[in-house]
Structures are given as C-alpha cells and as structure tokens.
Image (spheres, rainbow, N blue to C red):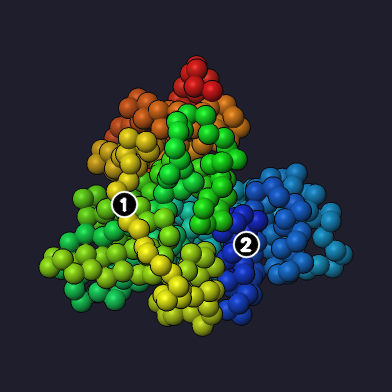
C-alpha cells in the first residue's frame, strides 16, 4: 500500500498522544492523522492546533458529533471504527501508537503488515502478540521503535554497545516505585485518586495504576524480551525513585553503561521520532551539580506481587502473557470504578492466569485467549468480596 499520510498519532487525546504532538511540533513535523476513542472536546482542540487531514474516532457517535462541530471547509475527513483506524495506520509512513491497552493491537498490526515505522507506546500490543507484530514488521521491512522511557533508553544503549552485544550479561530497567513506594500502611483501601497520583511521570489513569501495582514494570519485562531478543533472566528491575537513570546494560566483566535523561515523555518521543539520530530539540536537562543522591533498591514483591506474576507468565509462555494483560486491564478498570480494591488487582490476575493460560500457536489463539481471560476476570470480580 502506498503511504497516503506522513505522521499519525493514534491515542491522540491521551497523555502520551499529546506529548507526542508537542514533540513532533518542536521537530517541525506536521500531523496528517489523529485518532482517538471518544473525546470530542479534546479532539476539537487538537484539530485547531494541528489541522490534520483525517480524524478517526473509535466511537461512531463521537465521530458524528465531531464532524458537526468542525468548521465548514475544514478539509478534514472524519471516520470511525476499527476498520478505519487500521486503514489509516496502514497508510501512515510513521505512526505513534499510543492507544491504551489491547485495543491498540489491530492498528499496530495493520501498520506492521505494511512495513510502516511504528513508534510504540502501546506495550500491551507486544505483551499480547509481540512475536506476531515484530515478525510482520520484519517481513514487510518496517521498524518498531519503543517509546517507553526504559525501552527507548535500552535501545540507545544496545546501539552504542552493538559491537559488544555478546558480552552483555544482563540489562536493568528502572522503576520509580509509584505513589505507594513508601506508603506506611495497608494498601487494601488506597483510593483510585491516590493510585493515579504518580510522583514523577504524568500518565493516563490505567498506566498510573499499573505503575502503582508494579504491573507496568512486569509488562515492560515482557516487552523488553520481545523487542531485544532477551531471556527473562537477562532482564532485572531495580527501583529508582528519582527516574534519572532509565536503563543499564551490564557486561560480563561487571562494567555497566547507563542511559540518563530528564523524566519527560516528550524527550523519549522526540528520540523515537529521530531514531537513530539524536533529536535537535531539548526538553529539560539534568544539572548534575544540584541533583543530589540517586537511590536504588530491590522491588518489594510481597507488597507488589504483580511484577513476579509477569515474570511467571513470561516463563510459562503460550497465552499466559496475553491472559495476564487482559486480566490486569479488567481488574484495573474495575478498581478505577471502585468495584475492586487495590490489593485485589493482583489476586484477580493470578486467578485468571491460573485458570485460563494455555497453549497458543497462532494470533487467533492469542486473541481468543484475551477474550476468554476478560470474561473470566469479570466473573471473578463479580463473585468476589474484594470491593
């Protein structure tokens, strides 16, 4: 398929999408396509700022409402639905994939199958079907560039150490620890408002809760293994509250290389857009004279069991990572609706993985496992007393 569009942002009204639009603007890159779920007001604001040629809303009612409110002669088509989203992704030379959760998989696969350049902020797509996404991109001559600060940093380190790749013993991804790292009491009754109050990063609600449970880091372990052909025992997590160091590679002789940068999603997206070059923009800088001490500590797997659940799912293979991701999405959204308490998120995930994980040879198997896991997790939440 011929590239009909240049740059597209999928998940445009979310935190990562907006950061990506700002980074693209600073780099002088115009935006042809904006896609989102149903935030009409947010999309109208983005249209006024970026004047895309095409807007896609997942919700048909939202698309109709948006089309009515665009100015006459705007020169912008408005479409809706998954089919339109996939067609647009397949037609973009570069897409920023920032749709939250497994909902972003189809558009990522569509872009991969056409050999497009995918700036991947949607880690769930790789957790659910990473081998299929990456194989499709390789077969079509495409490129997947990670946007997560840790994977973006690791990609940079591995590029710098390319001639010494065989000497790399393991890699370290850092975790801020989230809002409850030093919480003095029981986490059973912490509120959604407290869980989304991240101490370092500005993120959407779902990923903020994942950071609070440490599931975000578990998903990142799986993503790192997929992206960089690593084994689970080669990927370590260390809690680093300052979020200055984003990734470390450790060589066989004990020597290490670390990537450090300001904690700003605009920086990581700008690096992804310019990859493998260094972008010609700066979003803040580290003043090493004023930084003070940097802290590193071991994750507390007793208080935050989701990280170990992810390692176990990765080791189990088959559909286990897809089931883990699906159950987590259902549990987190139930927590945000106050239907489940915080500590029960990991319990629902563990129960669902134990019940539903199995063999998965094809993409259809993984999609079916995702659907069954969501249904199981929903039933488990309804019958539980963990609300």
Residue 202 location, quadrant: bottom right
Which x, y percent locates residue 14? 61, 54
Q: Is residue 7 above or below residue 11?
A: below
Q: Tell me the tag on residue 18.
A: 2
Q: Residue placed at 17% from the left, 61% from the top?
A: 169
Secondary structure of residue under mark 2: helix
Which x, y percent locates residue 365? 37, 38
Q: Earlier in the sequence, mark 2 or mark 1?
A: 2
Q: Is residue 62 above or below residue 335?
A: below
Q: Residue placed at 30% from the left, 32% from the top?
A: 358
Using the numbered discs, state the Cα–Cα distance from disc 2 to disc 1 in whole angstroms: 32 Å
According to the picture, the residue beneath numbered tag 1 turns out to be 297
Answer left or right for 190 relative to 156. Answer: right
Secondary structure of residue under mark 1: loop
Question: Given contact means CB atoms under 8 Å apart, are the residues at marks 2 and 1 in contact?
Answer: no
Q: Tell me the tag on residue 167.
A: none
Q: Is residue 80 above or below residue 294?
A: above
**Foreground residue among 185 and 299:** 185
Look at the image and tell me in which quarter the C terminus lies. Answer: top right
Q: Residue placed at 24% from the left, 49% from the top?
A: 232
**Foreground residue among 360 and 226:** 226
Q: Residue placed at 44% from the left, 37% from the top?
A: 184
Which x, y percent locates residue 182? 43, 44
């Amino acid at each position: 398929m011929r590239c009909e569009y240049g740059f597209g942002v999928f998940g445009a009204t979310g935190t990562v999408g907006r950061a990506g639009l700002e980074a693209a603007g600073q780099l002088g890159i115009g935006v042809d396509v904006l896609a989102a779920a149903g935030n009409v007001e947010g999309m109208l604001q983005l249209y006024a700022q970026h004047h895309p040629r095409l807007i896609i809303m997942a919700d048909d009612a939202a698309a109709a409402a948006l089309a009515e409110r665009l100015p006459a002669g705007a020169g912008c088509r408005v479409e809706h639905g998954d089919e339109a989203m996939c067609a647009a992704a397949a037609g973009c030379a570069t897409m920023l994939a920032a749709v939250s959760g497994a909902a972003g998989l189809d558009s990522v696969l569509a872009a991969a199958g056409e050999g497009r350049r995918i700036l991947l902020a949607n880690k769930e797509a790789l957790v659910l079907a990473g081998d299929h996404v990456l194989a499709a991109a390789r077969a079509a001559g495409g490129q997947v560039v990670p946007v997560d600060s840790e994977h973006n940093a690791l990609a940079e380190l591995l590029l710098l150490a390319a001639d010494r790749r065989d000497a790399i013993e393991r890699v370290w991804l850092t975790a801020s620890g989230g809002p409850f790292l030093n919480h003095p009491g029981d986490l059973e009754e912490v509120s959604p408002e407290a869980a989304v109050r991240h101490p370092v990063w500005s993120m959407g609600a779902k990923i903020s809760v994942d950071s609070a449970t440490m599931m975000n880091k578990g998903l990142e372990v799986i993503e790192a293994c997929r992206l960089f052909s690593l084994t689970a025992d080669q990927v370590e997590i260390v809690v680093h509250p300052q979020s200055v160091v984003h990734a470390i590679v450790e060589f066989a002789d004990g020597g290490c290389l670390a990537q450090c940068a300001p904690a700003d999603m605009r920086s990581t997206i700008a690096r992804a857009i310019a990859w493998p070059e260094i972008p010609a923009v700066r979003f803040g800088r580290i003043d090493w004279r004023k930084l003070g001490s940097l802290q590193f500590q071991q994750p507390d797997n007793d208080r935050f069991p989701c990280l170990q659940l992810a390692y176990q799912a990765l080791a189990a293979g088959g559909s286990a990572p897809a089931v883990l991701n699906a159950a987590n999405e259902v549990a987190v959204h139930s927590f945000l609706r106050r239907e489940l308490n915080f500590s029960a998120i990991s319990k629902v995930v563990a129960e669902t993985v134990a019940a539903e994980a199995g063999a998965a040879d094809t993409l259809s198997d993984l999609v079916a496992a995702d659907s069954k896991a969501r249904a199981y997790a929903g039933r488990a939440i309804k019958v539980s007393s963990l609300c």
